[in-house]
Image (cartoon, rainbow, N blue to C red):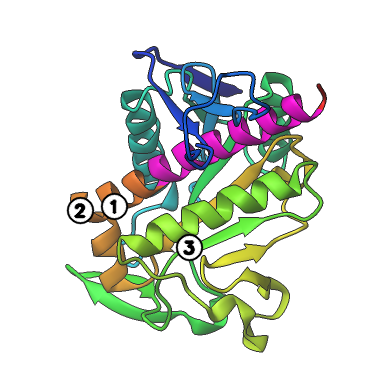
């Protein structure tokens, strides 16, 4: 079963106006100078689906302090959803799936393709390959950890129906995270990652290709997966649990959605003008 939660908020809009160079002297409106198209991000109608990675019963990776990934995913996804609503994206929604993989993955795809949002953002937190796992004891209990890797990563699929849109949003998100001092992890390009090795398509924004990932590949809308950081890393797990890090990621995601919405509106306006 998949639950999509919807909230309402106030309408907000932004406009971009491309101004023509100032003439030497005033000219009448019909002097042959065409006004540039105006692009507006209609936040009240732009639909963003924020997917909570994994489920309550299949919690994903286990953190260095014994907390399942799903708890991190749900908390961050809910904050991003609320931030979008507060920014005027009142059709932002949270997608929570209860079915276990792989049934749950295809169910998510079906929900997305039926609902047809303007953007899908899936929230996850990273682990490490088993070969790098070490063991430690915390408060009398034994846990697994790996402090070798840290940082976020962003994934898109070239097989997505709107790969161009997926890549654009991924790049915007990566740059917004970078502007807040957050770094992506480069280790997915290394040979030691084996089958988990990925192609880095934007070295500035930290965007990788993960073509085979079901949710990214089979959805028919721009789709991006964010691994917010490594919860196997003991220090980074604590940072990811802090209000400061969550606020930074949330703000970056919201800003990226705003920029993506405006870019899509600009493109639609230009296309509409070119047809006339």
Disc 1 + disc 2, Cβ < 8 Å: yes
Upstream in the sequence, badge 2 or badge 3?
3
Q: Quadrant of residue 76?
A: top left
Q: Position of residue 261 (x, y in %)?
A: 54, 34
Residue in the image at 34% along x and 40% along y: 75
Q: Which residue is outermost to the front?
A: 25
Query: Dot 2: few (<14), some (14–19), or many (≥20) neighbours within 10 Å?
Result: few
Residue in the image at 72% along x and 53% along y: 213
Q: Position of residue 193 (x, y in %)?
A: 63, 80
- Which residue is label 1 attached to? 248
- Which residue is label 3 attached to? 126
SS at badge 1: helix
Vertically, is 123 above or below 14? Answer: below
Q: Nearer the viewer, residue 110 or 10?
A: 10
Q: Position of residue 255 (x, y in %)?
A: 39, 43
**Magenta region includes residue 65:** no
Which residues fall within the magenta stretch?
253-274
- Alpha carbons under labels 2 and 3: distance apart: 19 Å
The N terminus is located in which quarter? Answer: top right
Upstream in the sequence, badge 3 or badge 1?
3
**How would you classify the magenta stretch by its main secondary structure?**
helix
Q: Quadrant of residue 118?
A: top right
Q: Nearer the viewer, residue 159 or 239?
A: 159
Q: Nearer the viewer, residue 211 or 176?
A: 176
Disc 2 + disc 3, Cβ < 8 Å: no
**In this orientation, does residue 17 appear?**
yes
User: Which numbered marker is on residue 244?
Assistant: 2
Vertically, is 46 above or below 184? Answer: above
Relative to 121, 194 lies left or right: right
- Alpha carbons under labels 3 and 1: distance apart: 18 Å
């Amino acid at each position: 079963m998949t639950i999509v939660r919807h909230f309402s908020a106030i309408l907000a809009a932004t406009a971009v106006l491309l101004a023509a160079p100032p003439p030497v002297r005033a000219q009448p409106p019909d002097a042959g100078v065409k006004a540039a198209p105006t692009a507006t991000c209609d936040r009240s109608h732009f639909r963003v689906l924020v997917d909570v990675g994994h489920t309550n019963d299949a919690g994903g990776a286990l953190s260095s302090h014994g907390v399942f990934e799903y708890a991190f995913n749900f908390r961050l996804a809910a904050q991003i959803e609320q931030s979008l609503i507060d920014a005027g994206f009142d059709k932002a929604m949270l997608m929570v799936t209860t079915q276990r993989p792989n049934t749950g993955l295809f169910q998510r795809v079906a929900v997305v393709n039926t609902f047809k949002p303007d953007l899908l953002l899936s929230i996850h937190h990273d682990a490490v390959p088993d070969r790098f796992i070490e063991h430690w004891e915390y408060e009398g209990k034994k846990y697994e950890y790996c402090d070798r890797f840290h940082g976020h990563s962003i994934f898109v699929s070239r097989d997505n129906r709107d790969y161009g849109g997926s890549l654009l949003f991924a790049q915007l998100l990566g740059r917004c995270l970078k502007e807040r001092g957050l770094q992506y992890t480069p280790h997915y390009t290394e040979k030691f990652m084996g089958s988990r090795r990925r192609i880095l398509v934007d070295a500035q924004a930290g965007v990788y290709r993960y073509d085979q990932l079901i949710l990214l590949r089979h959805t028919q809308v721009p789709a991006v997966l964010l691994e917010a950081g490594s919860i196997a890393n003991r220090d980074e797990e604590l940072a990811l649990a802090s209000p400061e890090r969550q606020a930074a990621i949330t703000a970056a995601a919201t800003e990226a959605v705003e920029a993506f919405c405006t870019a899509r509106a600009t493109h639609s306006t230009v296309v509409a003008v070119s047809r006339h």
